[in-house]
Image (spheres, grey):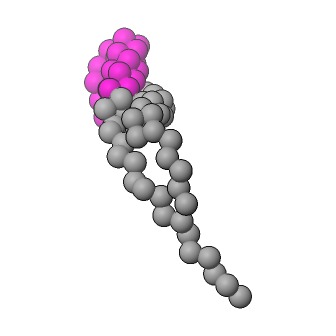
Protein backbone atom coordinates (compact mmCIF):
# COMPACT_ATOMS: atom_id res chain seq x y z
CA UNK A 1 0.00 0.00 0.00
CA UNK A 2 1.39 3.38 -1.00
CA UNK A 3 1.35 6.33 1.36
CA UNK A 4 1.11 9.77 -0.15
CA UNK A 5 3.18 12.51 1.39
CA UNK A 6 1.16 15.60 2.26
CA UNK A 7 1.73 18.60 0.08
CA UNK A 8 3.40 21.38 2.02
CA UNK A 9 2.15 24.81 1.13
CA UNK A 10 4.22 27.93 1.47
CA UNK A 11 3.75 29.75 4.72
CA UNK A 12 1.63 32.85 4.51
CA UNK A 13 2.90 35.45 6.94
CA UNK A 14 -0.14 36.75 8.77
CA UNK A 15 0.12 39.91 10.80
CA UNK A 16 -2.25 40.11 13.71
CA UNK A 17 -2.76 43.88 13.88
CA UNK A 18 -6.51 43.78 13.28
CA UNK A 19 -6.89 40.93 15.76
CA UNK A 20 -5.24 42.96 18.52
CA UNK A 21 -7.26 46.07 17.69
CA UNK A 22 -10.58 44.21 17.55
CA UNK A 23 -9.82 42.38 20.81
CA UNK A 24 -8.99 45.64 22.56
CA UNK A 25 -12.20 47.25 21.30
CA UNK A 26 -14.28 44.24 22.37
CA UNK A 27 -12.70 44.10 25.83
CA UNK A 28 -13.13 47.84 26.38
CA UNK A 29 -16.74 47.83 25.21
CA UNK A 30 -17.82 44.91 27.40
CA UNK A 31 -15.82 46.24 30.36
CA UNK A 32 -17.49 49.64 30.01
CA UNK A 33 -20.97 48.10 29.88
CA UNK A 34 -20.29 45.83 32.87
CA UNK A 35 -18.72 48.64 34.87
CA UNK A 36 -21.83 50.77 34.34
CA UNK A 37 -24.00 47.96 35.73
CA UNK A 38 -21.80 46.78 38.62
CA UNK A 39 -20.02 49.98 39.63
CA UNK A 40 -16.76 48.41 40.78
CA UNK A 41 -13.84 46.54 39.26
CA UNK A 42 -13.04 42.98 40.32
CA UNK A 43 -11.38 39.93 38.78
CA UNK A 44 -14.68 38.46 37.59
CA UNK A 45 -15.52 41.62 35.60
CA UNK A 46 -12.08 41.62 33.98
CA UNK A 47 -12.23 37.92 33.04
CA UNK A 48 -15.76 38.31 31.73
CA UNK A 49 -14.70 41.28 29.61
CA UNK A 50 -11.85 39.32 28.06
CA UNK A 51 -13.87 36.18 27.38
CA UNK A 52 -17.14 37.82 26.29
CA UNK A 53 -15.75 40.76 24.36
CA UNK A 54 -12.15 40.17 23.41
CA UNK A 55 -12.24 36.62 22.13
CA UNK A 56 -15.34 36.70 19.88
CA UNK A 57 -14.52 40.11 18.41
CA UNK A 58 -10.87 39.07 18.02
CA UNK A 59 -11.96 36.24 15.72
CA UNK A 60 -13.39 38.84 13.35
CA UNK A 61 -10.05 40.65 13.40
CA UNK A 62 -8.18 37.41 12.71
CA UNK A 63 -10.38 36.75 9.69
CA UNK A 64 -9.65 40.25 8.35
CA UNK A 65 -5.91 39.72 8.92
CA UNK A 66 -6.04 36.43 7.03
CA UNK A 67 -7.87 37.99 4.07
CA UNK A 68 -5.40 40.89 3.89
CA UNK A 69 -2.45 38.48 4.00
CA UNK A 70 -4.05 36.27 1.36
CA UNK A 71 -4.61 39.26 -0.92
CA UNK A 72 -1.10 40.61 -0.33
CA UNK A 73 0.57 37.37 -1.35
CA UNK A 74 -1.94 36.70 -4.10
CA UNK A 75 -3.49 33.41 -5.03
CA UNK A 76 -0.66 31.03 -5.76
CA UNK A 77 -1.06 27.60 -7.16
CA UNK A 78 0.44 24.90 -4.99
CA UNK A 79 1.49 21.62 -6.45
Which span of residues is magenta-colored? Answer: 20-45
Q: Is residue 1 visible?
A: yes
Question: Main structural element of the magenta stretch: helix, strand or loop?
Answer: helix
**Residue 41 falls within the magenta-colored stretch:** yes
Q: Position of residue 52 (x, y in %)?
A: 46, 30
The image shows residue 53, relative to residue 11, as above or below, that is: above
Q: Residue at x 54, y 65 (%)?
A: 7
Q: Is residue 54 visible?
A: no
In this rendered view, identify the residue nearer to me: 16 or 32: 16
Q: Position of residue 49 (x, y in %)?
A: 39, 28
Image mark count: 0
Q: Residue at x 45, y 34 (%)?
A: 71
Q: Residue at x 40, y 15 (%)?
A: 33
Q: Position of residue 63 (x, y in %)?
A: 48, 34
Query: Quadrant where the N terminus lies?
Result: bottom right
Q: Residue at x 53, y 50 (%)?
A: 77
Relative horizontal placement of residue 36, taking residue 9 as reference (left or right):
left
In this rendered view, identify the residue nearer to me: 24 or 69: 69
Question: Farthest residue toward the left?
Answer: 41
In this rendered view, identify the residue nearer to me: 33 or 26: 26
Name which quarter of the figure residue 3 lies in.
Answer: bottom right
Amino acid sequence: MERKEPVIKEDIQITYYFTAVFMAIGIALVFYILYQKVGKVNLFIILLSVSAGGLPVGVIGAFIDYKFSERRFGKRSFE
